[in-house]
Each structure stands twice: as C-alpha cells, then as structure tokens.
Image (cartoon, rainbow, N blue to C red):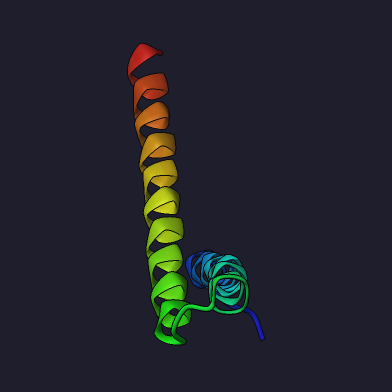
Amino acid sequence: MLYSITFQKIVIFASIGLIIGSLIGFSGVLGFGLDGSIFIISVLLTMVVVFAAAMFAELYHIREAINRSRNR
C-alpha cells in the first residue's frame, strides 16, 4: 500500500513519540515506583511534544522556501 507523505510523517512521528514516551513511562513506573497512570501521561505528553516539534520544523521549512523565492 502506498500512503501519502503526510500520513507517513504522522505515523513516523507518532511511533517516535510512542517509543520515547514508553521508555520514560517504564522508567517512571519501574525505577521510581510511580503509579501506572504516569505511563499513559508520559506517552501522551511525549507525542504532543514530538508533533509540536515536527510542526515547528515544517513551518520553518515553509518560511525558508518563501524567503528564498522572494529573494530571487
């Protein structure tokens, strides 16, 4: 199956957020003896941060492309 570039980016960023969030959640639950809800919270917060960073990067690339086209 072929997916669009946007859908591929969403899946990649969601998987990155899921992996990093689960590592943070597991270390919080197992290492510090916190409640299991910290796992869910850390996964969700990490996914939000990853998507926010990706949106910032995309907007930065768009701004750079507009600036290059204006300078020509």
Q: Is residue 38 left or right of residue 24?
A: left
- Which residue is more in the foreground, 45 or 27? 27
Quarter where residue 51 is shown? bottom left
Check the image and name the residue furthest to the front: 33
Q: Is residue 39 left or right of residue 19?
A: left
Q: Which residue is located at x 46 percent, y 87 percent?
A: 36
Quarter where residue 27 is shown? bottom right
Quadrant of the frame with the C terminus: top left
Quadrant of the frame with the N terminus: bottom right
Check the image and name the residue furthest to the right: 1
- Which residue is more in the foreground, 60 or 33? 33
- Which residue is more in the foreground, 21 or 7? 21
Q: Is residue 56 left or right of residue 18?
A: left
Image coordinates of residue 2 in percent, x first then y, are: 64, 79
Image coordinates of residue 60 in percent, x first then y, are: 39, 35
- Please say if 51 is above or below 38: above
Q: Is residue 9 left or right of residue 40?
A: right
Image coordinates of residue 45 in percent, x first then y, are: 38, 66
